Amino acid sequence: MTTPALVREPASLAPVGAARRLTFRAVRPHLGTAAGVAIIAVLLWRLGTGVFLDGLRRIDTPTLVIGLAIGAVTTVLSAWRWQLVARSLGLRLPLGPAVGDYYRALFLNAALPGGVLGDVHRAVRHGQSEGDIGRGVRAVVLERAAGQIALTVFGAAALLVLPSPVRDQARDFAPLAAAGLVGACAVVAAVRMNRAPGRRAGALRATLAEARRALLSRRSGPGVALSSAAILAGHVVMFVVAARVAGSAASVAALTPIAVLALVAMGLPLNVGGWGPREGVTAWAFAAAGLGADRGLATAVVYGVLSFVAALPGLVVLVVRWIAALRYSRAEVSSSKTAPKESARLARSSFPFSADPREGRPMTPDSV
């Protein structure tokens, strides 16, 4: 007796479906990189490579020193914000190791595709060292969320108050967006009122409680708000410096909304080490403001170089910790196991490179 075709067909299609899912999972991490490369290619095709090279030629040593100085201030403030959030969640995080870890994360974000692998590495390593990866990850997520909240609040005010290429459109769109947001919140509230409490509701309440304790409490809230505002101001100042180096004479009031748009674009996961959407949005915004798309692309190029230079101390942190890890491994093999805890603390003696020597191992996809 033969098996009906309808019975055999699902079995024959199952491997095909599994292969398609595996192929999509393998390709998905590279979609953002491909999008960033496509944006850069379109910009170079439309504006030419001369604009890109002109932006690079305008960068001199004083400009690089300014980028390093601004990056040092924003990185220390970012590490302090991370420390405040982590302590509010009950995690230990000295400021020295926090600065080193943050520099390392910035460098990995700038050097690796996607722009977030450094933060993933920072979250997992800190969670492992404290014995709670979940809280370590949530601390980094909340710390980055504080920065996004500051950018959203300041950006909305800047785009609506200062002259910008999107101010008129935003004013027309704001009432519709507000009405839609209120309606969506009403629907969600109605659904939640008719739903029996469960594990997800409890987890959501716990997450919201952690967020309030980390970002809005009297102990950490003022410091988080102050550091977020200062960090955002540092990024805007660096953008203005980049515009001046690129040859733009526009006022700070005209450049601030464009800087906000560039910072928002940098947060999109469609880039190659931060390059892609930032250049496209900056070129469009400069053109819409009557400042010239080529000048906008040159500004974005200078800003990208300054951002990378500001993250370069992270490479030093990575190399120092990698060397410390090698020494720790050799000492562990050659010596007796008399005082492993004391050996593990050898790399905590110098600021800002203090950390567990084992953290110096280079990051791989498996380790993240």
Image (tube, grey):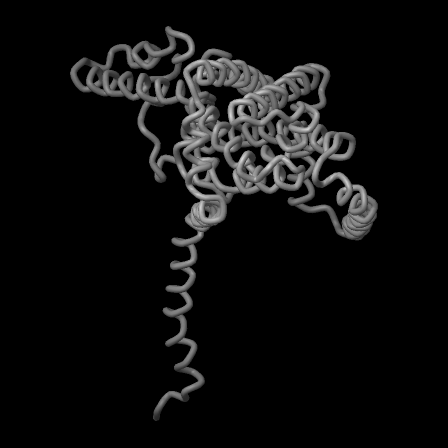
User: Which residue appears farthest toward the bottom when viewing the image?
Assistant: 1
Split into 4 quadrants, where in the image is the N terminus?
bottom left
x and y percentages locating residue 348 in the rendered image: 38, 10
> What's the residue at 42%, 41% (across, down)?
49
> What's the residue at 39%, 82% (across, down)?
8
Split into 4 quadrants, where in the image is the C terminus?
top left
Q: How many marks?
A: 0
Q: Is residue 208 visible?
A: yes
x and y percentages locating residue 309 in the rendered image: 42, 22
Left-right relation of 204 to 21: right
| Residue nearest the viewer, comparing 145 with 241 | 241
| Residue nearest the viewer, comparing 194 with 359 | 359
Left-right relation of 181 to 208: right
x and y percentages locating residue 257 in the rendered image: 68, 31
> What's the residue at 74%, 32% (across, down)?
163
Left-right relation of 293 to 271: right
User: Which residue appears farthest toward the left when viewing the image?
Assistant: 334
Q: Is residue 193 visible?
A: no
User: Which residue appears farthest toward the top when viewing the image?
Assistant: 349
| Residue nearest the viewer, comparing 220 with 104 | 104
| Residue nearest the viewer, comparing 360 with 199 | 360
Left-right relation of 236 to 128: right
Q: Is residue 356 above or below residue 280?
A: above
Q: Is residue 139 above or below residue 65?
A: below
> What's the residue at 75%, 50% (across, down)?
196
x and y percentages locating residue 160 in the rendered image: 77, 34
